[in-house]
Amino acid sequence: SAGARWRFFPPSVHIVGSGKKDAPVYNIPGPLEYATSCALVVRREVFEKIGGFDPLFQSYGEDLDFFYRAKQAGIRVGYVPAARILHKVSLTTRWLPGLRRRYLGRSTVLFFRKEKRFPLWQVYLSIAWKLLRETLLGRPKHLPDYWRGYRDGFRELCRSDCRAVKHDGKT
């Protein structure tokens, strides 16, 4: 990975260089919109300013949420191509691909709708695109996993909203 950037269509975060062989095009240092959390160097002051990784995410998306909040707080993020790390991608869910897809679906909803940061139509467009893409790629058997994840994400948001209302004493 060489960081990540926002993609307007479909509305999502695109990981630059994911699944591709390292190449000179990825050897240019510079600012990032998002970084993946498999290897980071973060100043303590950043955590003090925006908090840590949100446990709401469980797996996948916690880094996107973290860097979204950093960006909103005016914190600059950069890419250093000289830094190298070997990372066992998706080791947690490698042998449970259905669970991975479910977590990805859940995290999509949470990322888009946490604190209502994006309009609802954008999450629906992202969901529709993902389901259409899986179908067109001949993987319709993946759809139920994603669908369960999207459902889980919306349910978690409802639970979070209810907890926030009770915590504020506005029941």
Image (tube, rainbow, N blue to C red):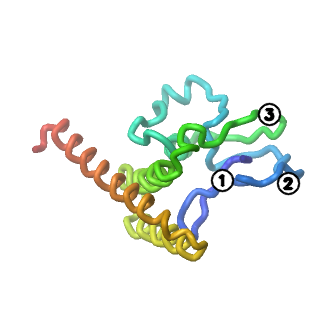
Q: Is residue 73 left or right of residue 25?
A: left
* Residue under numbered circle 3: 83
Q: Amino acid at mark 2?
A: Val
**Which residue is most to the right?**
24
**Circle nearer the N terminus (3, 2):** 2
Q: Nearer the viewer, residue 88 or 4?
A: 88
Judge the density around disc 2: few (<14), some (14-19), many (≥20) Cα neighbours within 10 Å. Answer: few
Q: Position of residue 81 (x, y in %)?
A: 81, 40
Give the quarter of the image for residue 145.
Answer: bottom left
Q: Which residue corresponds to the image point at 62% horizontal and 29% vertical from the top-left?
A: 42
Q: Position of residue 41 (x, y in %)?
A: 66, 29
Circle 3 SS class:
loop
Q: Nearer the viewer, residue 127 or 91?
A: 91
Q: Is residue 170 left or right of residue 143?
A: left
Circle 1 SS class:
strand
Q: Nearer the viewer, residue 90 or 120?
A: 90
Q: Which residue corresponds to the image point at 72% horizontal and 47% vertical from the top-left?
A: 1
Q: Position of residue 108 (x, y in %)?
A: 46, 55
Q: Is residue 58 left or right of residue 42?
A: left
Q: Which residue corresponds to the image point at 55% horizontal and 68% vertical from the top-left?
A: 139
**Label 3 vs label 2: CA separation?**
15 Å
Q: Amino acid at mark 3?
A: Ala
* Residue under numbered circle 2: 25
Quarter of the C terminus within the rendering: top left
Label annotation for residue 15: 1
Q: Position of residue 76 (x, y in %)?
A: 64, 40
